[in-house]
Image (cartoon, rainbow, N blue to C red):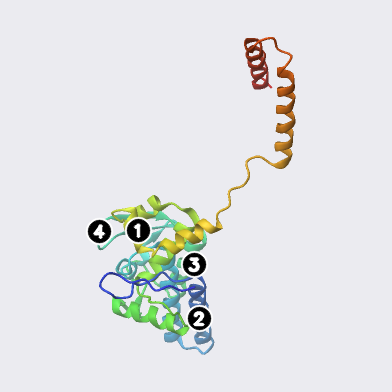
Amino acid sequence: MSRTFRVNFGRKTVRPFEAHDINNMLVLCKKTRNQAELDNNEEQRYLWDRNYMILVIGMNLAFRIEDILQLRVDNFKNGGVYTREFKTNKEQSFELHPSLYKDIQGYINRNELIDGEYLFKSRKGVNKPITRQRAWQVIKQLADAVKVSYPVGCHSLRKYFARQYYEKTGDIIGLKEMLNHSSERVTLLYICWNTDDKNEKRKQLKINDIITFEELSETKEYLNTKITNIYKYNNFKDLINDFSIELMADKTL
């Protein structure tokens, strides 16, 4: 169920995309791109291919939109990505999943991009990246096309990555470092993690029984035997000594 989150001054908070909405937007971009290719409409083919790759990179790299728009061909080398954040001036350098790197290289090759060229140009043949405002328009239009009903924006892709990562790993410290946040609390607020989410996870949690019924029966019989055998000892000291010897024997098995 979709929920609306609000910040203190009453404005709706931009939410992470839901997985099914991301999938629908990707399918829309690919279908429209392929149709444009069949129609020999190169301009539309490029624009929809560009929009598709904005989604792919945005949902996988967790970069801020301003850093995504500044990416060039030469930022992707040797199976990884190498760049510097605009906001923090921190270096980002890490290997990519092979299938993601292959997808990015496929985009570069299809559009005949070379080193120094921006990945997301305003139009083919002009080496100028689209603006943040245009990126927001692209994302909003795609969201409207697949009938997204919650507030979205440029950060919805980054938030999607962050929330998916946290839900699958529970690694809030690692996620904080990836996003370059100041604290875990900031990260939880960023991905819109609230009490409902916490309670839902708790409801789904089931701790497996440590001892099976078969093991429990064996343990019960073992204890009954021990209790019965207690009466054969003359005093407590003899019992302890015998029991200690048996424990030592168990450890050597």
Q: For marks 3 and 4, give the one nearer the viewer.
A: 4
Distance of label 4 from label 1 (alpha carbons) = 16 Å
Looking at the image, residue 209 sits to the left or right of residue 118; the answer is right
Quarter residue 217 falls in: top right
Q: In this view of the protein, which residue sits in the foreground, 1 or 140?
A: 1
Residue 234, placed above or below residue 102: above
Instruction: State the residue at coordinates (37%, 59%).
Output: 188
Provide the residue designation for mark 4.
Answer: 88
Question: Which of marks 1 and 4 precedes in the sequence?
Answer: 4
Position in image of residue 228 (x %, y %): 74, 22
Provide the residue designation for mark 3.
Answer: 103
Distance of label 1 from label 2 (alpha carbons) = 31 Å
Residue 162, placed above or below residue 252: below
Instruction: State the residue at coordinates (53%, 86%).
Output: 35
Distance of label 4 from label 2 (alpha carbons) = 34 Å
Position in image of residue 212 (x %, y %): 69, 41
Q: Secondary structure at mark 4?
A: loop
Distance of label 3 from label 4 (alpha carbons) = 28 Å
Provide the residue designation for mark 2.
Answer: 28
Q: In this view of the protein, which residue sits in the foreground, 105 or 221?
A: 221
Residue 131 visible in this rendered orientation of the protein:
no
User: Quadrant of the image for the C terminus?
Assistant: top right
> Type of residue at label 3?
Asp
> Type of residue at label 1?
Thr
Provide the residue designation for mark 1.
Answer: 187
Mark 3 and mark 2 residues within 8 Å of each other at the beta carbon: no
> Type of residue at label 4?
Thr
